[in-house]
Image (spheres, rainbow, N blue to C red):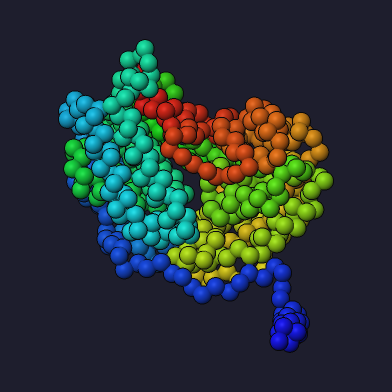
């Protein structure tokens, strides 16, 4: 019996073997997240002084689903008059109920917002994916839980500011103008609103014009939480709306996350004023693999750092440096892993890479891919069919990249990875720092001494060791050089909203 069974098994294995392909991903059945529990209004107004109000201009714009190019909703466009109304409402709230409220009472409201985000998490993660194009796994497992955690964490600080800054007397600033990008819409809103409220300030927030829906859902949550009117105001619109907010004379603090180009304009606009300023700008992060690193773990970290989030984080590990002795091995493993990535419907739980947020951003990515080829770099893309409708890009790898190459120096904000080699620690430190940016970096090695050496010499605000893209509300985040200044998150995130 045993002999017969073993022979039969060998025959089956022999027949099956020719059909196997090492780099071919399994064909998964679709596992779509439902949308029946999601409510998106056909039209959204501005959230000012605790109410949804029509824009002064009467103008609206559409927000679309980048995976299908279908319209999701019509969004109010705020102008300077709307900005003025929102700032006045925030100032009134600051001088009134919110400014006079104790830290312990403020904490109750902030904690309530956190709990409401948790209760509505399933709806919020689907809306985030519909409006932004990111895979539902990322929205569900990272964006929404972290947003709730930021409110929860800062609720705990609201009545402990004297302990946060001992022997000082911290006081709130007043009205904070906050402008956030499209890559982490709800998380960036929480990242900015939560510390501002904990420190006793009021807020006027402008979300990105391409991803306004979860910020407007947050406005509904704020209404349900009975936050005093005017404490948080949310204005939708494009660049002109943000410019009006930055230039308003009654704003005490500007917090901006976005491109370095726009950050420089904001810095110029605030120069000579009394406004405090926090800028979290672009990045061109170096991910460094040493020969003694756990290579499979490192490759997975590289994939996570640039492809799982479509490269749409300013701290994406878009520059890979591999020690020469393991270069061929790492490159082979990297290509094998890229071949298994699934690009497609962001609502499918099997999807690794969703849709690019907008046609404009997709054009920018394609422009840089063309530049990379013209500069002589060797390009590798996975052999996959992209959906016909929507804004999608194949994960792209460039080798033979020069240090001076534009694709190695400029932020692409897409699933494009450049690979270079190095021999010594000093060489890779010099290469890693040879960029205008300094937001983040990653180090993969088995030696703690190398980790400590690199973390002290790489000019980056965050350096991950044997992991990548890990965030926590208790950890500060921010950059050096053209990646901005100031810190958000953690105890340090409170300081930007206080006179100390």
Residue 132's x, y, as percent? Answer: 44, 56
Residue at screen point 63% across, 34% down: 436
Query: Split into 4 quadrants, where in the image is the C terminus?
Result: top left
In the picture, measured across the screen, residue 192 lies left or right of residue 358, that is left
State which quadrant residue 352 falls in: bottom right
Residue at screen point 58% across, 61% down: 393
**Residue 255 in sight from this viewpoint:** yes
Q: Nearer the viewer, residue 300 or 65?
A: 300
State which quadrant residue 322 falls in: top right
State which quadrant residue 94 falls in: top left
Residue at screen point 47% across, 34% down: 475
**Residue 408 in sight from this viewpoint:** no
Query: Split into 4 quadrants, where in the image is the N terminus?
Result: bottom right
Q: Nearer the viewer, residue 331 or 356?
A: 331
**Outermost residue, top side:** 167
Residue at screen point 45% across, 50% down: 142
Q: Nearer the viewer, residue 83 or 170?
A: 170
**Outermost residue, front side:** 1
Residue 301's x, y, as percent? Answer: 62, 49
Question: Looking at the image, how many numbered discs can be counted on the residues?
Answer: 0
In the picture, measured across the screen, residue 318 lies left or right of residue 207, that is right
Tell me: residue 382, above or below residue 149: below
């Amino acid at each position: 019996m045993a002999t017969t069974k073993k022979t039969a098994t060998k025959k089956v294995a022999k027949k099956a073997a020719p059909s196997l392909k090492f780099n071919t991903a399994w064909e998964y059945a679709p596992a779509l997240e439902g949308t029946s529990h999601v409510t998106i209004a056909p039209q959204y107004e501005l959230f000012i002084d605790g109410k949804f109000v029509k824009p002064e201009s009467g103008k609206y714009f559409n927000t679309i689903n980048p995976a299908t190019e279908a319209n999701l909703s019509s969004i109010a466009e705020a102008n300077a008059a709307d900005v003025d109304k929102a700032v006045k409402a925030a100032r009134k709230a600051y001088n009134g109920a919110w400014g006079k409220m104790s830290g312990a009472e403020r904490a109750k409201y902030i904690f309530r917002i956190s709990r409401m985000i948790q209760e509505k998490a399933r709806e919020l993660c689907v809306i985030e994916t519909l409006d932004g194009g990111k895979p539902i796994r990322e929205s569900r497992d990272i964006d929404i839980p972290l947003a709730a955690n930021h409110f929860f964490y800062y609720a705990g600080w609201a009545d402990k500011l004297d302990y946060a800054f001992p022997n000082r007397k911290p006081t709130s600033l007043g009205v904070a103008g906050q402008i956030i990008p499209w890559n982490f819409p709800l998380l960036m809103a929480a990242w900015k609103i939560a510390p501002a409220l904990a420190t006793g300030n009021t807020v006027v927030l402008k979300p990105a014009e391409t991803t306004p829906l979860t910020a407007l859902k947050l406005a509904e949550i704020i209404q349900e939480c009975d936050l005093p009117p005017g404490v948080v105001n949310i204005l939708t619109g494009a660049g002109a709306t943000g410019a009006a907010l930055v230039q308003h004379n009654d704003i005490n603090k500007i917090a901006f996350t976005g491109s370095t180009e726009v950050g420089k304009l904001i810095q110029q606009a605030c120069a000579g004023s009394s406004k405090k300023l926090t800028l979290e700008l672009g990045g061109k992060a170096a991910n460094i693999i040493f020969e003694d690193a756990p290579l499979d773990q490192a490759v997975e970290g590289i994939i996570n750092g640039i492809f799982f989030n479509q490269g749409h984080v300013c701290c994406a590990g878009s520059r890979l440096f591999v020690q020469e002795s393991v270069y061929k091995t790492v490159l082979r493993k990297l290509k094998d892993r890229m071949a298994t990535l699934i690009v497609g419907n962001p609502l499918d739980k099997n999807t690794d890479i969703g849709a690019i947020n907008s046609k404009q951003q997709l054009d920018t990515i394609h422009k840089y891919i063309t530049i990379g080829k013209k500069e002589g770099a060797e390009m590798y893309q996975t052999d996959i069919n992209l959906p016909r409708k929507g804004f999608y890009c194949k994960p792209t790898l460039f080798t033979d990249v020069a240090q001076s190459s534009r694709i190695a120096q400029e932020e692409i904000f897409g699933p494009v990875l450049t690979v270079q080699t190095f021999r010594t620690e000093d060489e890779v430190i010099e290469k890693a720092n040879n960029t205008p940016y300094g937001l983040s970096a990653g180090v993969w090695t088995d030696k703690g001494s190398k980790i400590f050496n690199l973390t002290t010499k790489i000019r980056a605000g965050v350096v991950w060791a044997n992991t990548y893209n890990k965030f926590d509300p208790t950890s500060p985040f921010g950059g050096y050089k053209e990646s901005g200044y100031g810190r958000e998150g953690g105890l340090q995130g409170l300081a930007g909203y206080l006179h100390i």
